[in-house]
Image (tube, rainbow, N blue to C red):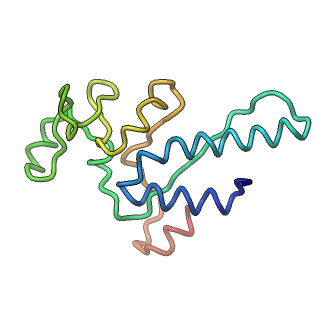
Amino acid sequence: MSINRRFFLKSSSIALCSIGLAQAAPSFLQRAVLAQDRQRIAGGGGGRRKTLITIFQRGAVDGLNMVVPFGERAYYDLRPALAIPKPQSGNNEAAIDLDGFFGLHPSLAGFKPLWDAKRLAIVEAVGSPDNTRSHFDAQDYM
């Protein structure tokens, strides 16, 4: 099966929008990158090229519970019922420590090996300069 852009976008959107399937996303992303490399190598391009995959979550995702700022006391003070527990060994419902301050939601455990290998970067709490307050204008801007 060849992995084209349309297949990639459709599959990654489905996988990442469904928190239950989030663990499968990293292996899918790795397969997509490897498939692209195989096609380029087969075409005589040779070597390995760096690939940037960007995933935009267009709503329905709580960024503070995807990338948990467990080192920030205010996170727990302001979200007593929603906060993901701090990393603890043996607790499968706790955040997965990334750097001593931020952690991943436990359902995103499949991304941890990519983080450890420095093949994953997380851009948290960003926005666009679009100030029209229009959802559709903001999507077009992206």
Residue at image point 36% right, 38% down: 109
Q: Position of residue 121 (x, y in %)?
A: 48, 35
Residue under the point 16% across and 43% down: 75
At horizontal 34% and vertical 28% (from top left) the residue drawn is: 98
Q: Nearer the viewer, residue 103 or 91?
A: 91
Residue 46 or 103: which is nearer the viewer? 46
Residue 105 placement (x, y as % from top left): 29, 43
Name the side, left or right, on which 40 lies relative to 66. Answer: right
- Count of marks placed on residues: 0
Asked whether, in this view, residue 27 is left or right of residue 72, the answer is right
Q: Which quadrant of the rendered structure holds the N terminus?
A: bottom right
Give the quadrant of residue 87: top left
Q: Residue at x 75, y 29 (%)?
A: 48
Judging depth in this view, the residue of 107 and 51 nearest the camera is 107
- Quarter of the image where one finds residue 102: top left
The image shows residue 14 at horizontal and vertical percentages of 48, 62
In the foreground, 110 or 129:
110
Q: Report the residue that reaches farthest toward the right.
A: 44
Q: Is residue 105 left or right of residue 131?
A: left
Q: Is residue 60 above or below residue 50?
A: below
Q: Is residue 112 left or right of residue 76?
A: right
